[in-house]
Amino acid sequence: MLRKLSWLGLLVTLLSSLFIAPVGAAVLDQVRNDFKPASGYIIMQAGDEFLIDQDASNGTRTGDLYAVVEPGEKIIHPVTQEVLGTLDKVKGLLQVTRIKTGYSYVVPVGKTDNLARGEGVRRFDHIPTAFWDYTGRGEDFFNGLKAALPALDWQPYAVSQTERPSVPSPEVAGTTPLVFVLRKDGLAVHGPNFVELKTYPPPLEIAVNQLQEPQAVATTSPAPSPVLPVPVPVPAAAEDRPMATKTLSAAAPKGITIYPGFQSLGQLSEGALWADFVATSDGLLLATTDGSKIRVYRLRNNQLTTVASAEPRHPGKILTLAWWQPADGAPLYLAATLVVDENRAYSPAQEKTINGAVFVLKDSSLVSVQESLTYLLGTFDLDGDGTRETLLGQTFDREKVFGSSLRRLALKDGQLDSSSFDQPLPWQFPVTGGRFFDLTGDGKKEVIFVSNRVLFVYQGNKKIYESSRNMGGSVSSMNFSAYPGTNAELYTSVTFEVPPLVFDLDGDGQNEIIAVGSTGSSITGARTGPGIDSAGLVVLKYQNGQFQKGSLGDRQENPIQGLAMDHEGYYLVVTQPQGLMGVVGASQLLRIPRSQP
């Protein structure tokens, strides 16, 4: 065998000598432009947020970081008396959450000193920054970044490589608010909590080095004949019959392990991007979606059967489902939230927006009631009788996703009519994944939800609990442009988390929270979903003026996409993460018996 460069490698070598410098410089120019410094001031405080006098006109984007800098003592040259700089003090970091005309909303990141109106803020200035190189060839590019962005507080290259994990992970990033991650497929920039802010193609010198690696070429002996796979008969797919009732297998699908403490109740017909349960007199109903179709199953006597299926009239990706029963004895309705292509003739690109759809379950059919609603939809038990009788619609806000306007939706003459819903809510409340329950025993309902892998509990607009960042971990997500068709176009990804359960587990008259918790990377992409190492149930109990945290049952390795409980146990729909084509893997219905502690 003789090793030599392929003709492709030789060609790339010649071309790279001509083009590496300008293309590499172009990548750095793009990064320099995206993270260029800007200066402004704090206008005022607004609840848990602040307003600063920066907007899209100076390049500000959602996710940008601003340091609150207090000028310190001047540094004066002893001979020339020239002012060389100042010993500035960083009082805190702020991150942009929403952008308006003339100002932006920001939230503090980590600990901050008392911030006041009129204090100066600087974009991407004095911010601790790490560079994780997974190519082994990125030190020159790192030096270029340092030169392009000198205002950042860069960690030395050798230190970053020593401390970086084998796989990018928020746990290792810790309190470092800005991390540049260079891999063979490109550069990604992560902000606080390791949320991805921006991605770029790989610098050409990195891509070229991959192609220049020597390739083995046979010169003396022919290659062996390939081994051909033996054809395996594949049974034809059964015809889809929504009206038919079908008993499903309880065997675990490939890729899903049933751990001790879990009972397998059946494999679902398709992978579940989202699942929601409702108890009926004839068993537990489970609605699931793979993103394009809705299926309803019934669990009765430990047998899982298919009841009905439906597809929205307009194509899109179904993100969430929620059962709704407006009154005792009324039919069951199912509310769906979809992401669809926005029909805008003036737009140079087809952008995404949100639609809501409502179906009614009649016998063995799901029948469309109303579609193309301009809301994200969620259902709630506001009167505390165990039935989600209230349907709420939330506006879609391109800057923060979950808009500040909520409407109560009710059926009137066969159509949905909206009215005001005036309860004060925190700005990041998601109607698709929130709950209202009295947790503290004061007779008032708290607001519970998971956002950005953190579980929050609010009393009105006052935050009374914030968990560590190991909650949620859903595979349901959407990617969209915050400012389509503009120079400030920024693509954002949002994850839709499974809403928690609230129940009095120990019979002491006080409710506990049962929520999905997970470990692993929070990086969520359009194709792959979150990198979950393990998932399980977390219990939070309010006791002696604070929340105590515990766990319920064993953990397993796949994301949890649906959650329910009854007198027999706790029900989980677990799903293999999405593959390269954006299709979720197999899903299984599991149960943890109530007798288990």
Image (cartoon, helix red, strand yellow):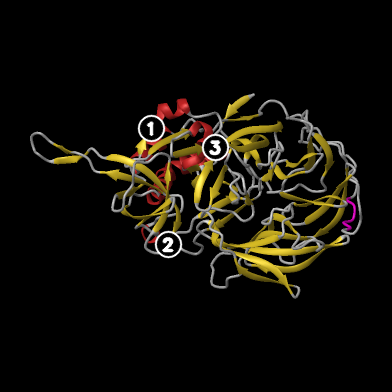
SS for callout 1: loop
Q: Residue at x 15, y 41 (%)?
A: 83
The disc label shown at residue 100, or none: 2
- Queried whether the magenta region covers residue 30, the answer comes back as no
Question: In this figure, which residue is indicated by the disc labeled 3?
Answer: 546
Q: Position of residue 374 (x, y in %)?
A: 62, 67
Task: Kindly tell me whether residue 567 is visible in this rendering.
Answer: yes
Residue 319 as seen in the image, left or right of residue 405 = right
203 in relation to 534, above or below: below
Q: Secondary structure at mark 3?
A: strand
Q: 310 and 301: which one is in front? A: 301
Q: Nearer the viewer, mark 3 or mark 1?
A: 3
In the drawing, what numbered circle is on residue 155?
A: 1
- Contact (Cβ within 8 Å) of mark 2 with mark 3: no
Q: Position of residue 166 (x, y in %)?
A: 55, 29
Which amino acid type corresponds to the residue marked 3 in the rendered image?
Answer: Gln
Q: Residue 390: image x %, image y %?
A: 68, 60
Q: Residue 462: percent from the left, percent from the top? A: 49, 49
